[in-house]
Image: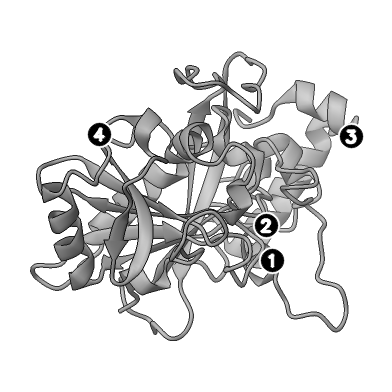
Amino acid sequence: MTDINPPRINRRRMLSITATTVAGLAAGALASSGPAQAAPSLCDLPGTGSVGPELCGPLGSGADCGGFNDVTPPGVTDRLFLWERVKNVTPAFPGTNTKVVRTSVSMIPQQPQPVPKVIPPPTPLSGSTKQAYAIRQGGTPGGSGPNNRLLIPTQRLSGIECSHIWQGTTLNFCKIAFDEANAAPRPVGTVPAIGINSKAARQQDQLHIHLSRAQAGVMKNLESALKKNEIKLKQADWGAAPHVTILGRTYRVLHRQNLNDNPFRLMLDNVAPKNMGEQMLAIVPAPQGGFYLINSEVKALPGGTGQVDSLLYYT
């Protein structure tokens, strides 16, 4: 029962789960799956979504993040389709997803960046907890190819505006997403790319990062921008002009040697301290090593955009 976090149980729901109850749940799972399988932990049992978040990791909640029991109102386009597909899944029971991965995250906030903070850093917590993410196939128009996939946290995280995604108590989803995209097969000469849309540009209200590959023109435009010194090398300069034109739209581009510092946090601190929900973010590898962090928005950036589709091939 390494995934159980007793303080959260006492604080959130005051659940009383006895050893007999756990044993009974495990026995029920064994009966349905055959005697050859080992007894799963409580977190691996299907249908435990009502207690699973308290036992298996922190639960995203709040006005900007959503709640575990959110449902789409009647008569409204289903914007919680992805959340419904990941809210109860585990590595042992991935549902309709390709896979579910559980990993640990250190409960220590990231080091403050050398710029003023509008949002204070999260309160330090000790130890670590387990969090998970699902990988599933994307929808149309990309079809079922390896470069049209999604990474979706199994926590309730609405999207780029949710403060949990840039705090040190949550997985570095950008780094994980790029590693997943980089592992997928793709045509020779193309590069992996990941992207996340702004709140207004997305169709689903559960955080999902597109795992794809970059359009050919993206890399050519970035090469040109590098020669003109338009790509920023210091994080504090990321939001400053001049900006970069990629395939006819305007972007801010920062070069980083690695993705160890959460790109969402970097964007919050240096570009969008008050309007994260209006931002888009794409990441591609830089030919000289490292990564290009590509950001844009509609309101504050002439010629900007809140969506990533024009940068990516979903095939």
Residue at 14 percent of width and 73 percent of height: 187
* Residue 122, quarter of the rendered image: top right
Marks 3,4: beta carbons within 8 A: no
Q: CA distance from mark 1 to mark 2?
A: 6 Å
Residue under label 4: 233
| Callout 2: SS | loop
Residue under label 3: 13
Horizontal and vertical percent position of residue 155: 64, 47
* In-front residue for pair 190/47: 190
**Mark earlier in primary sequence (1, 4):** 1
Q: Label 3: how many residues lie within 10 Å, few (<14), some (14-19) or many (20+)?
A: few
**Mark earlier in primary sequence (2, 3):** 3
Q: CA distance from mark 3 to mark 4?
A: 47 Å
Residue under label 2: 87
Q: Amino acid at mark 3?
A: Arg
Q: Quadrant of the N terminus?
A: top right
In this view, 194 is above or below 122: below
Marks 1,4: beta carbons within 8 A: no
| Callout 4: SS | loop
In this view, 208 is above or below 173: below
* Residue 195, quarter of the rendered image: bottom left
Marks 1,2: beta carbons within 8 A: yes
Say if residue 37 shows up in the picture: no
Q: Amino acid at mark 1?
A: Glu
Mark 4 vs mark 2: in front:
4
Q: CA distance from mark 2 to mark 3?
A: 18 Å
Residue under label 1: 84
